Image (tube, helix red, strand yellow):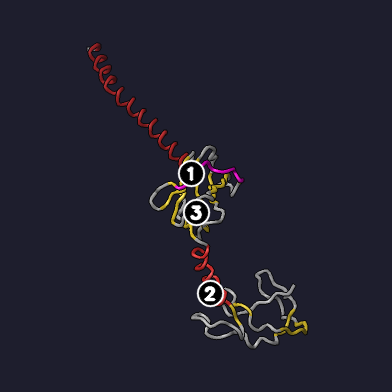
């Protein structure tokens, strides 16, 4: 009976061994997969392009920012149909952008001159794809941003010669043509004025100017 009992235990252990090996194998595979995912999550690369676009006849450069070395990588400029119009090796390492991206490479593609929408794809240790960007004439690229910038400054302008817009229907600070000048005040630990303001006796014309951050004050600082 003892022999039979021992034999039975042996058979049970034998039946348990294959599942144990399978379990160990699964654990090893899980660790390897998790390790690969961590390494992949730590590696990152981005292609930075001019969001306004590139003038057809001008020099064109994008930048590859990577968390690790991209030595040996290549890049391709592709049109909206996915056709490669230019390709080549990435440029020299220009240095560090930050601790997270210590490698920045130049991507020059001056020969791409046909007007259209493009993307840049990087193939290498860390793959990356840029946002889409335009190549066009300087007039087509810059006319809208220039108009928007001019409109902003027109809205910010104040004084008798302000420019009427939907946001600015009247001038402000027209009563500040004879504004008193005060000494720089002392401030307490909470950043508030400590004591009264002390006039210097000088008077300046502080009318007009520019609206500050959308509010209705005109700060002046004399050095």
Percent coordinates x, y for residue 83 in the rendering: 40, 47
Q: Answer above or below: position of 42 versus 181.
A: above
Name the secondary structure under disc 1.
Answer: strand
Does residue 128 appear anywhere in the picture? no
Q: Which residue is mark 2?
A: 151
Percent coordinates x, y for residue 8 in the rendering: 24, 17
Q: Which quadrant of the view contains residue 23?
A: top left
Q: Mark 1 vs mark 2: which is more N-terminal?
A: 1
Percent coordinates x, y for residue 165 in the rendering: 51, 81
Q: Answer above or below: position of 35 versus 151.
A: above
The magenta region covers 85-94
In the image: residue 133, left or right of residue 175:
left
Q: Which quadrant of the view contains residue 213?
A: bottom right
Q: Which residue is mark 1?
A: 87
Name the secondary structure under disc 2.
Answer: helix
Q: Between tags 2 and 3, which lies in front?
A: 3
Quadrant for the C terminus, please: bottom right
Q: CA distance from mark 1 to mark 3?
A: 14 Å
Percent coordinates x, y for residue 151 in the rendering: 53, 74
Q: Could you tell me if the residues under marks 2 and 3 are in contact, i.e. CB atoms within 8 Å?
A: no
Residue 113: assigned label: 3
Is disc 3 surrounded by few (<14), some (14 to 19) or many (20+) residues within 10 Å?
Answer: some
Q: CA distance from mark 2 to mark 3?
A: 31 Å
Q: Looking at the magenta stretch, what is its main secondary structure?
A: strand
Of residues 53 and 221, the one drawn nearer to the viewer in this rendering = 53
């Amino acid at each position: 009976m003892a022999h039979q009992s021992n034999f039975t235990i042996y058979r049970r252990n034998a039946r348990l061994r294959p599942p144990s090996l399978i379990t160990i194998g699964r654990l090893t595979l899980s660790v390897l997969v998790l390790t690969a995912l961590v390494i992949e999550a730590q590696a990152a690369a981005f292609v930075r392009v001019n969001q306004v676009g590139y003038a057809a006849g001008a020099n064109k450069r994008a930048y590859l920012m990577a968390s690790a070395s991209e030595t040996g990588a290549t890049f391709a400029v592709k049109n909206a149909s996915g056709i490669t119009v230019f390709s080549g090796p990435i440029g020299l390492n220009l240095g560090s952008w930050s601790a997270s991206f210590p490698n920045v490479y130049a991507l020059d593609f001056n020969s791409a001159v046909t007007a259209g929408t493009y993307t840049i794809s990087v193939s290498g240790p860390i793959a990356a794809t840029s946002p889409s960007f335009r190549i066009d004439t300087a007039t087509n690229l810059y006319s809208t941003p220039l108009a928007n910038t001019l409109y902003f400054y027109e809205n910010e302008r104040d004084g008798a010669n302000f420019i009427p817009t939907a946001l600015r229907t009247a001038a402000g600070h027209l009563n500040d043509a004879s504004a008193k000048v005060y000494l720089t005040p002392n401030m307490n630990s909470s950043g508030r004025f400590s004591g009264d303001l002390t006039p210097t006796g000088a008077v300046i014309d502080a009318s007009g100017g520019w609206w500050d951050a959308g509010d209705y004050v005109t700060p002046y600082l004399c050095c």
